[in-house]
Amino acid sequence: MNVGAADEVKERTLVKDAASAGTLAKQDGLLADPEQVQTLQQLAQALSLLLAGSGLSMRQVARRTKHDPVPVARETGGKMLRGQRLASKAVTLALVTHLGVPAPDLAAWERA
């Protein structure tokens, strides 16, 4: 296996492990721990890893939350994932909840 392929396997494993754990870890410089998020770009990266690990598209998340008390619009979620928008805590928590973060881990995402 070449170095690029090995890195890709590591990243996929991190994303898979992150989705199953509900929180993310920092590995090989890849920030994904909500406790370590300090910038909008870092938050976007962590949210992107959650989305990738969930197997959902932003469109699917938007559809699933359409009738929830706090819906996550596709455009809003997309801007959050690109680091172009800092949404309210309620929207951020709704997004991470639908991406598989368990209730006990939500406090870390609320602080992020």
Image (tube, rainbow, N blue to C red):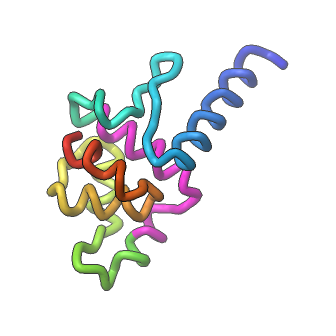
**Quadrant the C terminus occupies:** top left
Q: Is residue 103 left or right of residue 51?
A: left
Give percent across and percent down for residue 73. 30, 69
Name the residue at the right extreme.
Answer: 1
Q: Is residue 52 above or below residue 90?
A: above
Q: Residue at x 38, y 37 (%)?
A: 45
Give how far across and how far down residue 44 sits, in percent: 33, 41
Q: Which residue is pictured at 27% across the width and 74% down the height?
A: 71
Farthest bottom residue in view: 67
Count of numbered tags: 0
Q: Position of residue 5 (x, y in %)?
A: 75, 24
* Prevailing secondary structure class for the magenta stretch in the rendered image: helix
Q: Which residue is rendered at x = 40% and y = 27% of the image? A: 31
Horizontal side of 72 relative to 11 (left or right) equals left
Furthest-left residue in this view: 88
Location of residue 39 by image quarter: top left
| Residue stretch rendered in magenta on the structure | 42-61
- Would you say residue 56 sits in the magenta stretch? yes
Q: Is residue 41 magenta?
A: no
Question: Which residue is more in the foreground, 96 or 60?
Answer: 96
The one of 19 and 74 positioned closer to us in this rendering: 19
Image quadrant in which the N terminus is located: top right
Residue 88 placement, left or right of 79: left
Q: Using the image, determine if residue 56 lies above or below residue 47.
A: below
Q: Residue at x 59, y 40 (%)?
A: 17
Q: Position of residue 79 (x, y in %)?
A: 29, 52
Res. 84 image quadrant: top left
